Amino acid sequence: MHTVANIIRGRFQLVHLYAGAARARVSVLLVTACVLTLIMTASPPTFAQSRGASYLPAFPDGDAYNVLVIGDDFSYGLRHGLADAFVELPRMKLQPRPFHISGILRVNVAKQAKRLEAALTESKISIVVMMVGARDAVAIRNQKGKRFGVGTDVWNKEYARRVDLLMALFKKKSIAVYWLGLPVTSRQRRNESYRKMNDILRDRAFRNGLKYIDVFAEFGDAQERFSAYGPDLQGETRLLRDRDGIFFTGAGNRKLAHFVERRIRRDLKRAQQDRQIPLAGSVSEQAQIHAGRNTSKDEEGSQRAGSPKSEETDVSEGRPAPVSVVGEQKADHGKISLRLRNTAGSEEKIVLDILRPTISSSVISLIRRKATPNKRAEVGDTLIDNIPHGITVMSSITPSLSAPGGRRRVLSPTQSPFFRVMVKGEALPPVAGRVDDFSWPKQDTASN
């Protein structure tokens, strides 16, 4: 009996052990889930504003970017500066008037957001340039009437909350935003407040996936102290700041717009790269492009313009027959189907036509006649241009003759002397006898 009781008691102990192990496993799983949740929460913020590889959309509506300037008194001068900066950017359609917001702390941001949303939808805005906060460096009060100055925890949280409300609107509309910080001023106390406000703007822009442009140190001296005068875009010393020590003169607004223009040009270049659709090269890809053609390989081989026929002897005349002339190349058009997502998030299909016009036999014969075994025939220089609706046009031209027996070659922009010296920083080959000629021994260029 004691043995049976001991066995039963041992089995109950095993059951308790198994139950304890199961509870331990459940506890470990719960702890692991909590740790993963904390890691995901502490991870860097994900940017909800997804535009693919480029910040700007590669294919905007109407192949143009509608730009709206938003802000307080800064916005009017900034808009004039951008109008001059966008002269060389025809795809930038600047709205005639800025959207005025007197501040972030001085107004009801929720009401301003509703009014702004209607303006963004009506004008189909794709880019927003924002600069606001000149008069926001003031204390706030809570419901009990207690004051909180700039930089306190309560003030920082409230300012960040209002900034997030506006940024959430831009993210909802999938608008590219360039938010400028506040500049250095002639008042030291205001500068301290502006620095703290800029820190909040920089942090919220990063977390919301928007672009922040810091201009605080751009209008000061080497120690970031206020200076009313400074170099303009041509390097000449000009009066850049207004007499109040806060806002800008005409030259200052043009320089202020330059920092926005520089960022936009960089993003436009990246968006331009996304517009380039690589042409298909494999057999399967070519079959998709020429899906509407039912030409077999044999027919394509017979239609393809091959090498000229070998010489044949004309028996009647007793002399070699002339080389046969290659026939003209018929027009060969194709299509490419793309599936893209629009700003609303829905998928749409775009069909692009690839046009290749007819090439006459005389042109082909002329090109082939210039070909040699050591040098392939050159059709001419290739010119690339972009037309509306995201289509890239490539044309081939023959350069004109600069002199008898010589050809005038068109240099690539990256090979021009200006680009090589001013952008890439290269040194051009020196001319013998010139001041930059450091060759040794010196050659006497003077005539005897």
Image: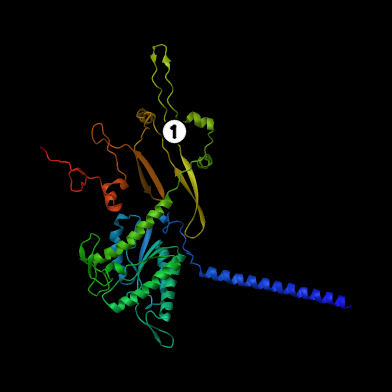
Quarter the N terminus occupies: bottom right
* Residue projecting furthest to the right: 1
For mark 1, give the secondary structure.
Answer: loop
Look at the image and tell me whether residue 283 can be seen.
yes
Position of residue 284 relative to residue 249, above or below, is above
Question: Neighbour class for label 1 at 10 Å: few (<14), some, many (≥20)?
Answer: some
Tell me where residue 311 sits by quadrant. Answer: top left
Q: How is the image coloured?
A: rainbow
Residue 157, horizontal then vertical, whole percent: 43, 77
Residue 447 picture location, percent across and down: 11, 38
Name the spot of residue 270 as percent of width and height, x first. 40, 54
Quadrant into which the C terminus falls: top left
Residue at (27, 38) in percent of width and height: 408
Count of numbered marks:
1
As rendered, which of 295 and 282 lies closer to the eye? 282
Q: Nearer the viewer, residue 78 or 421?
A: 421
The answer to which of 316 and 442 lies nearer the viewer is 442
Rendered view: 198 above or below 125: below
Amino acid identity at mark 1: Lys
Asked whether the viewer can see residue 135, the reply is no
258 shown above or below 355: below
From the viewer's perspective, tell me whether residue 423 is left or right of residue 338: left
- The single residue placed furthest to the front in the displayed view is 441
In depth, the one of 76 and 315 nearer the eye is 315
Which residue matches tag 1? 330
Q: Quadrant of residue 394?
A: top left
Quadrant of the rendered image containing residue 24: bottom right
Is 312 situated above or below 163? above
Rendering coords of residue 361 (x, y %): 39, 29
